[in-house]
Amino acid sequence: MAGASEGTGSDRVDVDPPKSGVQIPRWALAVILLVAVVAIMSVVFGGNAAQAALRGVAVGSIYVLGASGLSLTYGIKKFANFAHGDLMTVGAYVAFTLNVAAGQHILAGVVFAILVVAVLGIFLELSIFRRLEGRAPVAALIASVGVSLVLQNVLAAIFTGNVQYLNVGVPRDVPIGGTGLSFNFVKDGVALAVSAGFVIFLHVMLSRTTLGKAMRACADDLDLARTSGINTRNVILWTWVIAGSFAAVAGVLLAIIVNVYPLLGFFVLLFIFAAVIVGGIGSPYGAMLGGLIIGVVQELSKFIFVSMQQAGLIEGGAEYGPVGAFLVMIAVLLFMPQGLMGVRRHAMGGRVLARRVRRRTEGA
Amino acid sequence: MADVFQSMILQLAGFLVPATILAILALGLNLQWGHTGLFNAGVAAFVGVGAYTFGMFATGKYSNPGVSWYHWGPDRPIDMIAAALVAMAVAGIFGLLVAAPALRLRADYLAIATLALAEIVRLVLKNERRFTGGDQSLAFIPRPFEAFVPGNIGWASDGLFIFIVAGVALGVVVVLEYVTRAPWGRDLRAIREDEEAAIALGKDAFRLKLTAFAIGCAIMGLAGALLASFNRVLVPDLFVPASTFTAYVVVILGGSGNNRGVVLGAYLFYVFGWSTQQVRGYLPPDWSLRLDFINQIVVGVLLILVILFRPEGVLPEKKYVPRSPRAE
Amino acid sequence: MPPILEVRDIVKTFGGIRAVDGCTLSVAPQTITGLIGPNGAGKSTLFNVIVGLFAAEEGEVHFDGQRIDGLPPFRIVRNGLIKTFQIPRELRNLTVLENLMVAAPPMAGERLHELLLRPGQVRREEEAVIKRAEDVLETVGLRELRDEYARNLSGGQKKLLEIARALMAKPRMMLLDEPVAGVNPTLAQRILGVIEELRASGLTFFLVEHDMDVVMKRCSWIIVMHQGRRLVEGLPEAIKADPRVIESYLGV
């Protein structure tokens, strides 16, 4: 690390120095804005909007699981893993095998799904992504597209391309008191609870455990982490294990709520990318927030499009739900690429800054 | 005898025409990705825009007789070459609009943004029936020289189409080879290698990238127009974002940056698909279904292997070794 | 003669840190002027600001009487001011010749309408540029490597390429960021010899170097930067003995 090292520095992270006075963080502003939008829409459109927001949170909780896993590998390996959705599909099919073919309880399916996908993640890292470390991140992206193709079609070849269902009873919606809203124990409740549990787990792990801190260090500056004595290879493998586990559980949830087919995970991949981008690459917390935001935006934008449809402006209505989420993502990419909780990266300035800071702290 | 000949032509056309259209599409992508390093994951959208624009302009408003609704377009159909040019222009302008804000994004962000865009385009095509006929499809799209071919449908029309696409493809290759071997192409490759260095050497990188992107999109639009004409019918699901990855496989396997390699890649891809079809007849029924999936698995594995071990593809970029003008 | 380069009160910050903190200096034409200072003094940052790769928050830059701050880098290069990179940024998968040709001033073949409408002109200009590139390669001693991919060059050869490339742009002034750092002494002498020859034929050089021998021997004027601003400037003998300079190097 000694000596001048000039480069684009675009992967260096600078932390803005603490500003004086009270500063509301970006993400809090976003949450406030979203709540305000939901409130306004509930007034305009009535109870259905609030119901949609609730549904959005439930949908979003699956995105949260997928996005936090994705953001872990994105942060540490520095590439967009286009196969992440298919990892979810693999989890769904493992659960299907145990639940339907072998007649086991769904929880056994979950456990095995986690095991299989974690091992798969390790396998992919060792055989493919490790070898691409010195190359441009696009190489790994393309390789992950290849992996995606393989995974989808292996599953289709084994299980056929038909839609399948898990052996899990999904209860009916239950109306909530006098609010006019309804709640589904599994679709809303279980999904939220499971997500919340995993989110808490991730938070505790990242902030309290040695592994978690090592993961954060590696995501921040891999070289620095390595020279500081962290076994970066192992940390990377553990990251894949955790990311894979999250993906597996997300896949099983999707399988329970929707169904099982080879493109299950790929279908939500764009939403998960949207969540990671809105939340900020490199921040698992951002990914969590992003997942909820994308879910709610997706459901809410259906309302806007339906009323546009009724006004005769457009022909499609609820089908345009994804469009709302994608437009938000594109807007974030263009105007706030670091996302809500990502750290601002200075192109070309970071290395200079880091060098000077390091020299100052190292002494003469 | 005549029957055998006719069915041979039909079969040949069913293979050569889509393969050549894919080659043209891949040439456009090669300009963006292979030469300039721009990861456009929205290929399907630009092809779709070109296809539907051609369809609209070549059929005119009231193309579906007996149906009460109509799709957007001029009152009367216009000449097919003009329609193709309009398709190219619309796709190119659409590309400009997308590129202007998006090109400053780094590669993976550009990929995700263009992928999302492609999905939005597909949804619009699917739902806005007054533009596109939506799921009911845009039908009765004409083919060139139909007047000379009695009955339009059949081996003669298909056979003629082979020559049409081959001619177009040849034209595109010739023009692209010329401009990419010229200083303009060299500037693009400089940007691909190290954009900041290229800027520091005096290149207006933004303008160069914008131009390359727009021209690539126009070529994709042309491929879409040809597709529309050959297919005669358009449905939105022809343009799912996943089909973008097929184009990338062709470009990367064939040889990024090498126009001839890319064309070769397109034909290899179809040969592979064709040979899969041949094997199908010899397999028991449930394996026959699986064959398509196995086909895709092989493609995916090939992609991974190529990226790992031979990223330059089958035909790598040719080295520029001009004659020395000094008398030695 | 008026200075060819003038920097007035330039401020450049990253995050909370002022890398360049109100820097004012000027460079006389047809000289080899040195820019020295301890690490972190802001020298490379200042160079990047001058050629437009960074945007300064405050201040102005004037080149040859024209104001250039705020201009995009490619326009500054076309005006005759170019910078080399401290760590060579060769265009890896292009040949040495191509690397040089990329740097040449705008050619007809770079514009699409000219390519299509005036192919003869395009070809003529291309040949002229190839010839000039070969001459430049001859000057720096890289002629035999003309068709070699730039990625296959040794470290010293890449340094030479960096300079050769900048020369192709027909600059009137070159900012060299550590042109001989990490280069073996023989090659360093050759590079410095080339620089001196070019200076005699009218070019101005402004260079950052840490090798004090080189700076003292080759520069006719030295500017010292410290913590983002100009500390002192003068003849090499004066700078060598100046207590402020010695202190700034020891203090960091």
Image: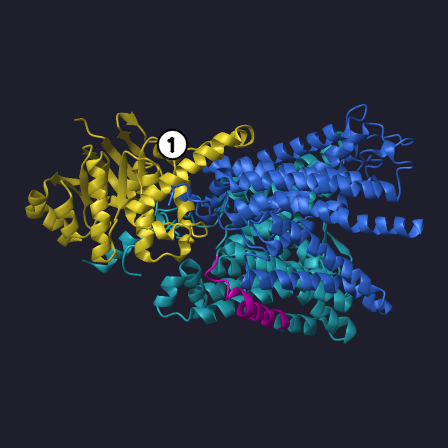
Chain colours: A cyan, B blue, C yellow
Q: Mark 1 lies on which chain?
A: C
In-front residue for pair A84/C141: C141
- In this rendering, would C222 be left or right of C176? left
Residue range (magenta): A116-135
In-front residue for pair A198/C41: C41
Which image quadrant for residue A242?
bottom right
- In this rendering, would C77 be left or right of B67? left
- In this rendering, would B102 be left or right of A259? left
Please state the total of marks drawn on the protein image: 1
Rendering coords of residue A300 (x, y %) = 66, 42
**Residue A297 appearing in the image:** no
Rendering coords of residue C21 (x, y %) = 24, 39
Task: Name the residue that disc number 1 marks.
Answer: C75
Q: Which residue is drawn at 46% across and 70% down?
A: A233
**Residue C40 appearing in the image:** yes
Q: What amino acid is labelled 1 in the image?
A: Arg
Q: Residue at x 18, y 43 (%)?
A: C34
Q: Is residue A158 above or below residue B267?
A: below
- Assign the magenta stretch its main secondary structure: helix
Q: Which residue is drawn at 62% across and 32% down?
A: B93
Give the quadrant of the C terminus of chain B: top left
Residue A118: in magenta span? yes
Which image quadrant for residue B90?
top right
Q: In this view, does B287 lie above or below A275?
A: below
